[in-house]
Image (cartoon, rainbow, N blue to C red):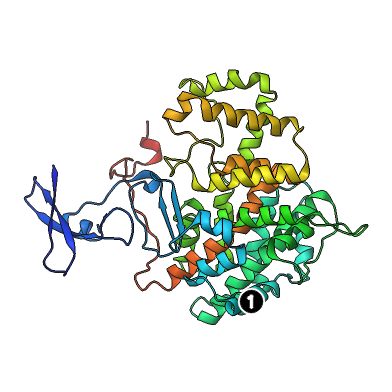
């Protein structure tokens, strides 16, 4: 059987083209609509493929399959472009702040001054968590990974906030969205404090989003906490850069869980679980583990050589990207932020950070990496920044989850409001045994 694809005008729908598929074994033909996005390549609508020709597509990893239409985030990996609602990530990181970016992702437009004030106030007054939730942490082992704690606690929010789990009620969806964005830094800081054996620190309403989180993470009752405007700005920028990234694994997980009608807290907990993987949110943690494995600047050439050897399983973590075949636009911003943080903290003599800077220098000047466009990505720099700030590697993905929550919430809301939304049900290419009769036990050989 062969299928022939022929682009042609589609007169049935004004202004829309189609492609024709022809099954040469049966002679059947099928016109499939060719959809035109506001930006990016055209998309073949294959929803009628199975009913029309009796076939469906096979696309492991969904590398060439769109699961939904969305107005939130656009990525052009070849050109190194990332847009939130049409705004370049570089401009938002330079001129905006996380609360304004969160509003943009949720509502589609940048807020007016009054809208931003109202939104920020609403988020601020949702940052405290139910007091009984604090006892929930004590059920975890002291050495539990903070992401394991996050999965459990966020999933348990539906047991504490029954008044915002009805997804058919727009007001309840709004309340749940605000609660998740507001409480995630508090929940994350509590997970960090629990791992250290330190008392929980309550949020302060006069502080900004990132500044509040840093205080909850690093303040102790025994002395006054002195925050740094540079570190707060760096953390705010990290949150902006990680707020959304189109239909990645964790976002797709949130949408898939949400398609069943699950409550928003369960959906976000599912996203956290997906984010935990080392190939996704755990990549910056993997960068630090790699740097510790290298250990010394003198050994960098050895590991560069290993990275070039296709028969060696070693890979340089933090270089290249699944989507970006050019420089990761977030990495450019993060590189500058990294320098600012290191200058503020004066930690240039840290051997691991010095090793990272030398590895960056070599990789950016090595023809092997340049030809393959294996540039340092956002995970490379964020890992360095977070280590310099004093976060252990186990907290790196937790911080990613704080930032990504607003993207998950925006994507979840968009899916719920989509009239074409259906419960997710991927197909499969079955390669197991064909139908066969049951054989009695005494007759089996």
Looking at the rendered structure, the secondary structure element under dot 1 is helix
Question: Residue 346: where, in percent of width, then height?
Answer: 78, 40
Q: Residue furthest right?
A: 222
> Which is nearer the eye, 393 or 130?
393
Q: Is residue 59 above or below residue 240?
A: above
State the residue at coordinates (74%, 72%): 130
Q: Is residue 56 left or right of residue 168?
A: left
> Which is nearer the eye, 248 or 265?
248
Q: Quadrant of the N terminus?
A: top left
Question: Residue 372: where, in percent of width, then height?
Answer: 42, 30
> Which is nearer the eye, 413 or 246?
246
Question: Residue 174: where, in percent of width, then height?
Answer: 56, 76
Q: Is residue 367 above or below residue 336?
A: above
Q: Where is mark 1, residue-wise?
A: 117
State the residue at coordinates (67%, 23%): 297
Q: Is residue 18 above or below residue 420?
A: above
Q: Is residue 391 in sight in this rendering?
A: no
């Amino acid at each position: 059987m062969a299928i022939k694809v022929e682009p042609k005008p589609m007169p049935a729908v004004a202004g829309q083209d189609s492609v024709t598929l022809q099954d040469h074994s049966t002679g059947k033909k099928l016109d499939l609509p060719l959809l035109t996005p506001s930006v990016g390549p055209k998309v073949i609508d294959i929803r009628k493929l199975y009913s029309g020709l009796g076939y469906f597509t096979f696309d492991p990893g969904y590398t060439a399959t769109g699961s939904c239409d969305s107005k939130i985030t656009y990525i052009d990996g070849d050109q190194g472009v990332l847009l939130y609602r049409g705004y370049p990530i570089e401009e938002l990181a330079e001129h905006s702040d996380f609360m304004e970016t969160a509003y943009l992702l949720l509502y589609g437009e940048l807020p007016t001054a009054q809208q931003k004030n109202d939104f920020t106030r609403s988020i601020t007054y949702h940052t405290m968590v139910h007091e009984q939730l604090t006892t929930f942490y004590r059920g975890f082992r002291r050495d539990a990974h903070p992401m394991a704690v996050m999965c459990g606690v966020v999933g348990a929010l539906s047991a504490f906030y029954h008044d915002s789990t009805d997804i058919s009620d727009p007001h309840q969806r709004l309340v749940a969205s605000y609660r998740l964005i507001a409480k995630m830094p508090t929940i994350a800081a509590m997970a960090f404090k629990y791992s250290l054996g330190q008392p929980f620190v309550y949020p302060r309403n006069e502080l900004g989003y990132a500044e509040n989180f840093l205080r909850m993470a690093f303040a102790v009752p025994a002395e006054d906490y002195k925050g740094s405007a540079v570190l707060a700005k760096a953390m705010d920028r990290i949150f902006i850069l990680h707020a959304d990234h189109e239909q990645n694994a964790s976002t797709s997980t949130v949408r898939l869980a949400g398609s069943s009608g699950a409550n928003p807290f369960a959906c976000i907990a599912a996203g956290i679980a997906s984010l935990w993987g080392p190939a996704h949110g755990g990549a910056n943690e993997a960068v630090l583990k790699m740097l510790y494995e290298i250990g010394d600047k003198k050994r960098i050439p050895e590991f560069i050589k290993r990275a070039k050897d296709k028969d060696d399983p070693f890979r340089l973590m933090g270089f290249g990207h699944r989507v970006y075949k050019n420089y990761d636009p977030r990495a450019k911003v993060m590189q500058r932020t990294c320098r600012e943080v290191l200058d503020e903290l004066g930690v240039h003599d840290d051997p691991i950070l010095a090793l990272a800077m030398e590895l960056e220098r070599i990789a950016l000047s090595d023809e092997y990496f340049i030809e393959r466009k294996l540039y340092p990505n956002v995970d490379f720099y964020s890992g360095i920044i977070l280590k310099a700030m004093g976060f252990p590697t186990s907290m790196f993905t937790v911080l990613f989850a704080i930032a990504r929550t607003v993207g998950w919430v925006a994507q979840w809301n968009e899916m719920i409001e989509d009239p074409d939304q259906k419960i997710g049900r991927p197909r499969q290419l079955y390669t197991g045994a064909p139908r066969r009769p049951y054989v009695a036990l005494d007759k089996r050989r």
